[in-house]
Amino acid sequence: MAENGTQAEQPQIKMNVLTQFIRDMSFENILAQKGASGEVQPDVKVTVNLDAKKRTQDNQFEVVMKLGVDSGVKGTDEKMFLLELEYVGVFNIEGVPEEQMHPFLLIECPRMLFPFARRIVSDVTRDGGFPPLNLETIDFVALYRNEIARRQAEQQPVS
């Protein structure tokens, strides 16, 4: 009987992806414009920015994942290609306590979106004339913790 009581106290978390889409994307093949001399080794840098906001409908949230891929020629400052992707998911979320909503939106929701964004990056780089770029899995928990630590450090008075 006590087991039923504890289940009633903890609300069931429900998350549905209502839609996901590319809000903005650009790909620039700099290497093709300039031409390559000999064989080049890529040096790829990936940046990830996340944002989330409540929508006007009850229990609906919009999560934006911005991926920036900067590929240069290793050992030089020459660029091979630049890719920017702004990928959005609209979620219906119920049962998450208010104090846990921020981390939920910036950890769990991006986990749901990432495989689709990774596929887009892979397809665009391949269609842009390069080998498909398969992004490594992103640790959204570590990303969230680093952002919180960065914000706290910014708020510390400089002595």
Image: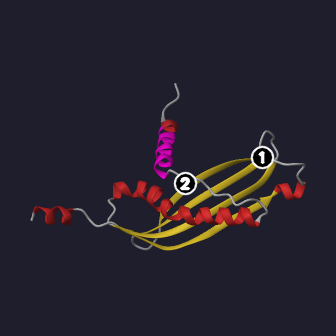
Identity of the residue furthest to the top in this view: 159
| Residue sitting at x 48%, y 46% | 142
| Residue sitting at x 52%, y 38% | 154
The mark lying in front, picked from 1 and 2, is 1
Q: Main secondary structure of the magenta part?
A: helix
Compared across the picture, whether 20 is left or right of 84 comes to left
Residue wearing tag 1: 41
Label 2 is placed on what type of residue? Answer: Thr
- Please say which color scheme the image uses: secondary structure
Compared across the picture, whether 46 is left or right of 10 comes to right
Residue wearing tag 2: 137
Residue 124's spot in the image, x, y percent? 71, 65
* Dot 2 alpha-carbon crowd within 10 angstroms: few under 14, some 14 to 19, many 20 or more: few
The answer to whether residue 151 is magenta is yes
Q: Callout 1: helix, strand or loop? A: loop
| Magenta stretch in the rendered image | 140-152
